[in-house]
Amino acid sequence: MDYQYHIFSPYRVCPLGAHVDHQHGLVTGFAIDKGVDLWFNVRSDSMVNLTSGSFEGAVSFDLAKPVQVREKHWGDYARGAKYALRKRFELKYGIDGHLQGSLPVGGLSSSAAVLIAYVMAFAKANGVELNPFEVVLIASEAEREYIGLNNGLLDQACIALGRKNELLFLDCDNNEYRHIKFGGETGEGNTDINNLFEIGIFFSGLTRSLVNSDYNLRVFECKTAAWNMLAYTDQPLKPFDKTFLRDIPKSTFDKTRDAMPARFARRAEHFYSEYRRVRQGVTAWETGNLPLFGQLSFDSCESSIHNYECGSTELIAIYNIMRQLPGVYGGRFSGAGFKGAVIALIDPAHKAEIEKAVTEQYLAQFPEYEKTFKCYFVKTDDGARFV
């Protein structure tokens, strides 16, 4: 079939700022040059008909009718986009579309990329003009309220707002963001980073769903840590959905960390230490210090393992292998880090050796993933757009 419109919605990676967006922390990220393609035509009625090269079956529903309950099927993401858009706009015209992802599912926020593509497509079909940050907010709302994942804005922001060769820095408390050019040797932000920096992505072979992982549990543990701090210092408690670690000074944590249960103290320790690492990382990127930026990413992963307590045996194995290799500046789990993928910030001159070493050493430990383990190298890219 010939399609009139084509949207490319990139996957994203987060080198620093993991697991803190839902607590209104500071995050960084890149859009990458792999992602989701959605081709579509606008219909004269309100029906939506979708096929996919990545998932089995077809999806069909009426865009103009109230949203039905989730079916726990890949079509839920299209229905989620409909749900969030219908709260704001009248939707009269549906689409016939085909969806195709370019990498395995797991760790790169493919769900957020798909949601953003659907939001943009349904808006286009109905003459709704949205700026990129409005797309971020609508897609994030769809994932929280319809899909059921208590996420922040990190994934959607990287996907919709990313810029090639630039680091996205987002404050999830006030939603202010900026794009940071790499400083390089000149310090003038005009170094071609493609000669210095690419992103390795290692898929463990496991697949996962964040809704079915411990992701939401960790969100609640962070909020419970915040409640503990407020209670121990005799401050008024806020409703749980209005409670965020960002609102509590680190000095309060220092006074109360030994009093609260250790698991909650570890979650808070990750938040406050990640806040510091993001600040340091932004400066490292601005000044062209890739070794420091990479080391901070390693440190972030260590905190994810020991303080946030995520990471499967397989992901930790990949991380431990890659951090010993020449040409790897840094890296960490990608996504929530319960299964999925590991990212590495690498010197492109060492790609072949890195791929060979990680593949051989990982499969020596986990031969059962020989057919599903994958390694890719990608570059940064611009955010979601019509092609």
Image (cartoon, helix red, strand yellow):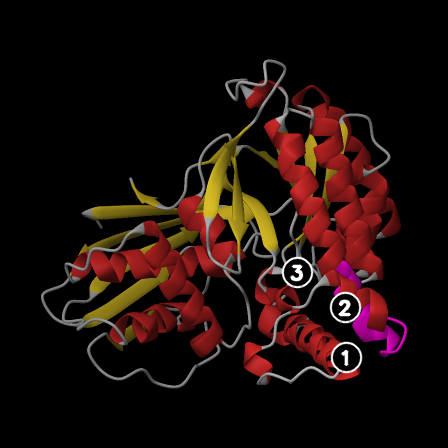
Name above or below for residue 200 compared with residue 93. above
**Which residue is painted at 22% across and 50% down in the image?**
1
Name above or below for residue 175 compared with residue 209. above
Q: Which residue lies furthest to the top in this view?
A: 186
Reading the image, the residue beneath label 3 is 19
State left or right for residue 250 relative to residue 175.
right
Seen from the viewer's position, the closer of residues 78 and 294 is: 294
Q: In which quarter of the image is residue 48?
A: bottom left
Span of residues in magenta: 257-270
Seen from the viewer's position, the closer of residues 223 and 136 is: 223
Q: Marks 3/2: CA distance?
A: 21 Å
Q: Do residues under tags 1 and 3 come within 8 Å of each other at their CB atoms? A: no
Local secondary structure at mark 2: helix
Q: Quadrant of residue 52?
A: bottom left
**Which residue is painted at 69% across and 19% down in the image?**
349
Q: Which of marks 2 and 1 is nearer the N terminus?
A: 1
